[in-house]
């Protein structure tokens, strides 16, 4: 999907997994079994960002 030099570090960007899911579903008619790892990674990232946001709001409220 990306050139050789980029493939190593691009997977640290969470949006990569979203783009990869859309690409697989749109181009290869992938199902849940094919993209479940990307879904889990996106959910974990979302929980982490949500938790950081909650902690930030709590710090400002105190």
Image (cartoon, rainbow, N blue to C red):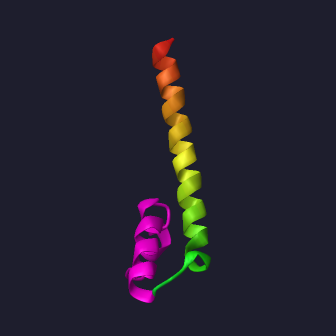
Quarter assignment of residue 20: bottom left
In this rendering, the answer to whether 47 lies above or below 18 is above
Q: Position of residue 1 (x, y in %)?
A: 40, 82
In this rendering, the answer to whether 30 lies above or below 45 is below
Locate residue 19 relative to residue 58 in the image: left or right. left
In this rendering, the answer to whether 18 lies above or below 50 is below
In the rendered image, residue 59 lying in the magenta stretch gets the answer no
Q: Position of residue 43 (x, y in %)?
A: 56, 55
In this rendering, the answer to whether 9 lies above or below 23 is above
Q: Residue at x 45, y 88 (%)?
A: 28
Locate residue 44 relative to residue 59 in the image: left or right. right
Locate residue 29 relative to residue 55 in the image: left or right. left
Q: Position of residue 38 (x, y in %)?
A: 55, 68
Kindly give the residue lying farthest to the top in the view shown. 62
In the rendered image, residue 9 lying in the magenta stretch gets the answer yes
The residues colored magenta run 1-28
Q: Position of residue 59 (x, y in %)?
A: 51, 19
Q: Nearer the viewer, residue 51 or 11?
A: 51
Q: Nearer the viewer, residue 50 or 29?
A: 29
Dominant secondary structure of the residues highlighted in magenta in the image: helix
Kindly give the residue lying farthest to the bottom in the view shown. 28
Q: Residue at x 49, y 61 (%)?
A: 12
Q: Residue at x 45, y 60 (%)?
A: 13
Q: Residue at x 47, y 24 (%)?
A: 57
């Amino acid at each position: 999907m990306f050139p050789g030099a980029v493939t190593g570090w691009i997977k640290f960007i969470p949006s990569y997994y979203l783009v990869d899911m859309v690409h697989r579903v749109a181009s290869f008619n992938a199902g849940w079994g094919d993209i479940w790892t990307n879904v889990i990674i996106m959910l974990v990232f979302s929980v982490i960002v949500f938790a950081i946001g909650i902690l930030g709001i709590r710090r400002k409220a105190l």
